[in-house]
Amino acid sequence: MNYLVKLLILNLPYLLFLFKKETVEPVIIQQEKIRIIPTDYFDNPVHHSIQLAGTFCELRPNHFHTGIDIKSSAGVQGDPIYAVADGYISRISIKPDGYGNALYIDHPNGYTSVYGHLRNFSPELEQYVLQEQTLQQRFDVELYPRKNQFPINKGMVIANMGNTGSSNGAHLHFEIRDTKSENPLNPLLFGIKVDDSEAPGVSYFRLYGLNNDWDEFGARNVLVTKRNGIFVPRSGGDTLRLAAEIAGVGVNTRDGMQNNWNKNGVYKINLFVDDTLYYTVKMDSVSFFKTRMINSHLDYPEQKNKKNYVHKCFSQPGNTLPIIIHQNNRGVIPLNTQKTRKIIFEIYDFNLNKSVIQFFLKKDTIHLKIPPVAFNYLLKFDERNTIKNDNAIINFPKITFFKDLKFNYLSQSDMSSNIYSEVQQLGDLDIPVFGYYDLRIKNRNLPSQLRNKAFIASCDDQNRVINWGGEWQNNLYITDVNQGEWLYATPKAFGSFYITIDTIPPTVKPVIFGRDMRRTRKIVFTIGDDIRPGGTTTQLRYSTYIDDKWVLMRYDLKSRTITYDFPANFPAGEHTFKLEVYDPMNNVTTIKNTFLK
Ligand SMILES: [Zn+2]
């Protein structure tokens, strides 16, 4: 067997390990596994040379990219997608967003391959899916076929490339996961070859002043230029000064490939301080549970407000991402006025093309002016925190934040006509939140007939109202605050929260629909709502009936369209059409009409 094995340590940054390079048996040390990645087991899922539009663990809003994005051969949909190894279809997922149409194949070696944004499945699978959708009378379905239902051989065409779900252009989102834990691994570790001999590009690095509480201050970007093959500060010389006793550094970098305009995420970053390896991130594996920890790894305000991605090479105490495989002192760098620190970043793509940034860092002799942080609550990141008063009860589970938080909380009256509680001002939008927390807000003056239209709202950066949902609870078990009626939701962002109502039905507009449908092959509507679903709140739901029989309409969230395809054998004559669209508060818009075919 040609076992060019690669040894990879997962979630195990600090353990010592022993192995022989050609070992095939997994080595167990301290209950953890050193994984042996087979590099000749999986074929490519496409038969053209692979160009990437996205890499593994590339930084995205609120998540790491958990696969690779493979571009189409000619920029259009339809390339055949091949099963990468023997196995069986373990899951089929259809969604208006996310992965769109997706297939999961379980393989006997303990891995699952995942194929997303597909235009269509193979005819046998298409038929099965339509049957299940008709049975459940809904478009979005999660199907888990039996083990022997759809056996798959390596190289079988299972689908065609598409653009369904959250996708902007024809491509295949391809993942390899550990079947048991569902943790995604970098697919390139399995021997998929990518033609890339260009080293990553760097536009700037970023310096942070830090204190012992992990407050960041005086952060600034330093633009770079290439001199003698090395990136150095563009102006002002190689020695930089920072008015802080502790420094952190980060870098904005993207990797290019020849014949490909896409700039993708890098594979590995090493930070050296005074020629000692100080901090390493390496994109081998991540878990879905920890993916939102990205908001501690990257510079959150830079990403949210400027759409710039900075890999911070220091880790707040709540950040336990497995991509951090080495760290001294959590990456923070002590400074003093006497000694100049030599800082080097080495940045690699998967093919180990390398870029280097070098500069020197020194503590500024000017007097430190650390701005005091105003706050009225100190929330411990590794403890459960509760804020409780007559108007709200807020519970933050452990690790809702990545460091102890100097938090500002205020309960305020707002007499606007559509606000039915005090407004709960929690921190601000620039503070990242790891997971859901519990928020209960007391009903102030909501008429009882509107109870089922009420939800907990906040506003996003663009001032759109977000619906975080809401469940009414009577104050049965909370004895030390006033009795009352409470609306309960689980947001995962900060901002100003209040109880409001939605009585406005969704908008439904015909795009292709009319009295005479004899020359058209489909019916298309756009559907939309003025309120954004947040957290666990559902998207719009809808049902369509032709001649009083439920029919399938495909939902594409990015274009907000729902589409019915007339089958070839659709009978000629007059037909009835009914479409009902519901928002999360069950406000409904109904379209009823007849048409000719
Ligand atoms: Zn993708």
Image: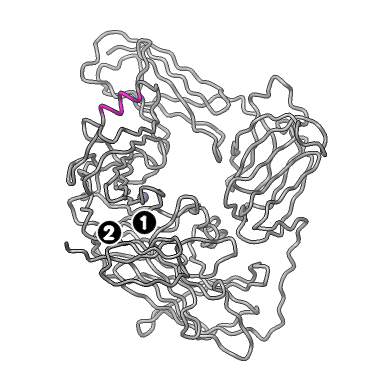
Q: Residue 223, relative to residue 159: is it above or below?
A: below
Residue 234 in sight here: no
Numbered badge on residue 190: 2
Is-magenta flag for residue 131?
yes
Q: Which residue is drawn at 57% across and 49% down?
A: 435
> In the rendering, at what x and y percent does residue 256 appear?
32, 65
In the rendered image, the quadrant that contains the C terminus is: top left
Question: Identity of the amino acid at label 1?
Answer: Leu
**Residue under numbered circle 1:** 185
Q: Residue 218, relative to residue 420: is it above or below?
A: below
In the rendered image, the quadrant that contains the N terminus is: bottom left
Is-magenta flag for residue 422?
no
Q: Do the residues labelled 1 and 2 touch (CB within 8 Å)?
A: yes
In what element is the residue under mark 2? helix
Q: Is the magenta stretch mostly helix, strand or loop?
A: helix
What residue occupies the far bottom of the structure in this picture?
A: 338
In what element is the residue under mark 1? strand
> In the rendering, at what x and y percent does residue 13 appear?
46, 68
For the record, the magenta segment spans 127-133
> In the rendering, at what x and y percent does residue 574 appear?
30, 8
Cβ of mark 1 under 8 A from ligand 1: no
Q: Which residue is drawn at 30% across and 11% down?
A: 596
Binning the other alpha carbons within 10 Å of mark 2 as few (below 14), some (14 to 19) or many (20 upward) gives: some
Q: Please state which of residues 466 and 107 is positioned toward the viewer in this rendering.
A: 107
Question: Identity of the amino acid at label 2?
Answer: Phe
Mark before the other along the chain sequence, 1 or 2:
1
Total number of numbered discs in the rendering: 2
Cβ of mark 2 under 8 A from ligand 1: no
> Is 122 left or right of 369, judged from the image as shown?
left
